[in-house]
Amino acid sequence: MKKLERALKRYGRSVGTSKAEQKFDKALARAVRPWQNVFKGGTLYSKGARLQRRKGNFDDPMGNRKIKGKRKGVYGRKVLPKRKAWYAIFFARPAKQIPGHKRISFYRIYASRSRDVIKNVNDEITNLLIELAKTNFRK
């Protein structure tokens, strides 16, 4: 019984460390890749938006960023435009000045890959917890 208690304490300490947080970050970053990849290859030029190709900023416009809100208890990853493609934000939330034929339905594009992301998150977190349990619950 004492052995189990010690293993649980060790497990709790290792999950709270920055090393464990980095592992969770990597797992979540891999999990949200389908949302990132759906925009690769100039998708925004051909999604009905008729955006002009000026610098090729929309060939790979999306990156993912860590979200960590201690006060609100939020932790995860967020897929959003990279700095070089910042003006994609205006298409994400259709403004009145953007004509209807140039608006991009980001919600619909993300929704097409949501199943893959949910499956990936489940797999990644399960694998990570198994890995942490193997390292901390030794005989």
Image (cartoon, rainbow, N blue to C red):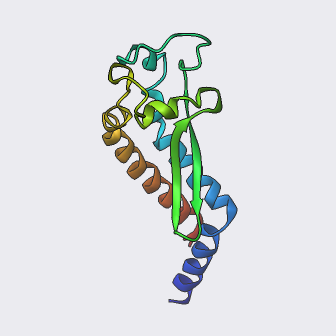
Up the image or down, 85 lies above or below 122; here it is: above
Q: Position of residue 1 (x, y in %)?
A: 50, 89
Farthest front residue in view: 97
Up the image or down, 86 lies above or below 11; here it is: above
Q: Position of residue 23 (x, y in %)?
A: 60, 53
Q: Which picture quadrant has residue 82?
A: top right
Up the image or down, 72 lies above or below 93; here it is: below
In-front residue for pair 71/86 = 86
In-front residue for pair 65/127 = 65
Left or right? Give the position of 128 relative to 102: right
Q: Position of residue 38 (x, y in %)?
A: 42, 27
Up the image or down, 119 lies above or below 56; here it is: below
Q: Which picture quadrant has residue 5?
A: bottom right
In-front residue for pair 19/45 = 45
Q: Residue at x 53, y 20 (%)?
A: 58
**Count of numbered badges drawn on the protein:** 0
Farthest bottom residue in view: 2
Farthest top residue in view: 53
Q: Quadrant of the C terminus?
A: bottom right
Q: Residue at x 59, y 45 (%)?
A: 65
Q: Residue at x 67, y 67 (%)?
A: 17
Q: Position of residue 121 (x, y in %)?
A: 42, 49
